[in-house]
Amino acid sequence: MRVQVVDHPLVAHKVSVLRDKNTPSPIFRQLTDELVTLLAYEATREVKTEEVQVVTPVATTTGITFAKPTPLVVPILRAGLGMLEGMTRLVPTAEVGFLGMARNEETLDIITYADRVPNDLTGRQVFVLDPMLATGGTLAEAIKFIFARGAESVTCICLIAAPEGVERLKEIHGGDDRVHIVLAAMDEMLDEKSYIIPGLGDAGDRLYGVTAPIA
Ligand SMILES: O=P(O)(O)OC[C@H]1O[C@H](OP(=O)(O)OP(=O)(O)O)[C@H](O)[C@@H]1O
Ligand SMILES: O=c1cc[nH]c(=O)[nH]1
Ligand SMILES: [Mg+2]
């Protein structure tokens, strides 16, 4: 499993504004959208391609296009939805599946409440979108779910991670080169409620301006 923290001033600046508790939802949504495009640039570096003939106004040349089957993008509802448009803007031919997952804030159990992902993911490169990787429980479930349907690889694009969550995923997928995690920031730790410190609070609540009921 590879973990990559994208080290770039544009990313660090946008994450800093995102963290600020006074940043309102509209700006939070815009920054999330901008950040995912910066992370997607790195996350798609190994997307499968094939050659294609291109006729320019002056000559014919060989270009590349995405190979079939096309990449599948899977935002984890609710917060991952805030990353979808930025991703599909960069990879417009990607297909999109949806997973609804919520962490019970008291037990930390993960509830999967929506599955709109194709049954057969054989040979697919899957890009999972979720801004927060805290205990890693949600992503562990999502990765298990996607591999159970036959995916070739899973790349998770997250904004902020806690070391505890990354360690948990490494315990499961450490020797597995099919799993790739791309992050904007690796934070310090989890607090007693398993929120990321310093983090940015509840990403879903900050994106959408409402507190979701406990799952
Ligand atoms: O690593 P974990 O400890 O599993 O926590 C991370 C999860 O928590 C948040 O979602 P949440 O359950 O709050 O759902 P929401 O997007 O509907 O707010 C976040 O978007 C992740 O999916
Ligand atoms: O810090 C955290 C942890 C889980 N989910 C969030 O949205 N934020
Ligand atoms: Mg939430």
Image (cartoon, rainbow, N blue to C red):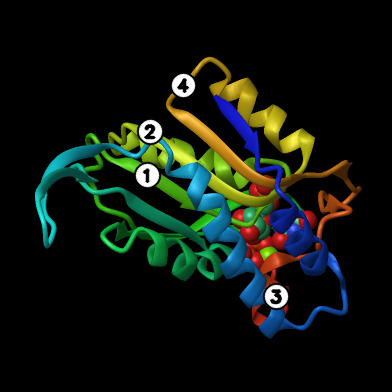
- Residue depicted at 66% across the width and 70% down the height: 31
- Mark closest to the chain's N terminus, 2 or 1: 1
Q: Which residue is mark 4?
A: 177
Which label belongs to residue 28?
3
Please give left or right for residue 16 compared with residue 132 in the image. Answer: right
* Distance of label 4 from label 2 (alpha carbons): 8 Å
Name the amino acid, label 2: Ser
- Residue depicted at 52% across the width and 42% down the height: 141
* Res 190 quadrant in image: top right
Name the amino acid, label 4: Asp
> In this view, which residue lies farthest toward the front?
58
* Res 121 quadrant in image: top left
- Residue depicted at 89% across the width and 54% down the height: 198
Which label belongs to residue 126?
1
Q: Which residue is mark 2?
A: 153
Position in image of residue 103 (x %, y %):
65, 55
Task: Evaluate if marks 2 and 1 touch, with contact meaning CB atoms under 8 Å apart.
Answer: yes
Please give left or right for residue 27 compared with residue 121 in the image. Answer: right
- Mark closest to the chain's N terminus, 3 or 4: 3
* Distance of label 1 from label 3 (alpha carbons): 25 Å
- Residue depicted at 80% across the width and 68% down the height: 17
Task: Evaluate if marks 1 and 4 touch, with contact meaning CB atoms under 8 Å apart.
Answer: no
Task: Please say if 83 is above or below 69.
Answer: below
* Tag in front: 1 or 3: 3
Ligand 3 sits in quadrant? bottom right
Is label 2 in a helix, a strand or a loop?
strand
Name the amino acid, label 3: Phe
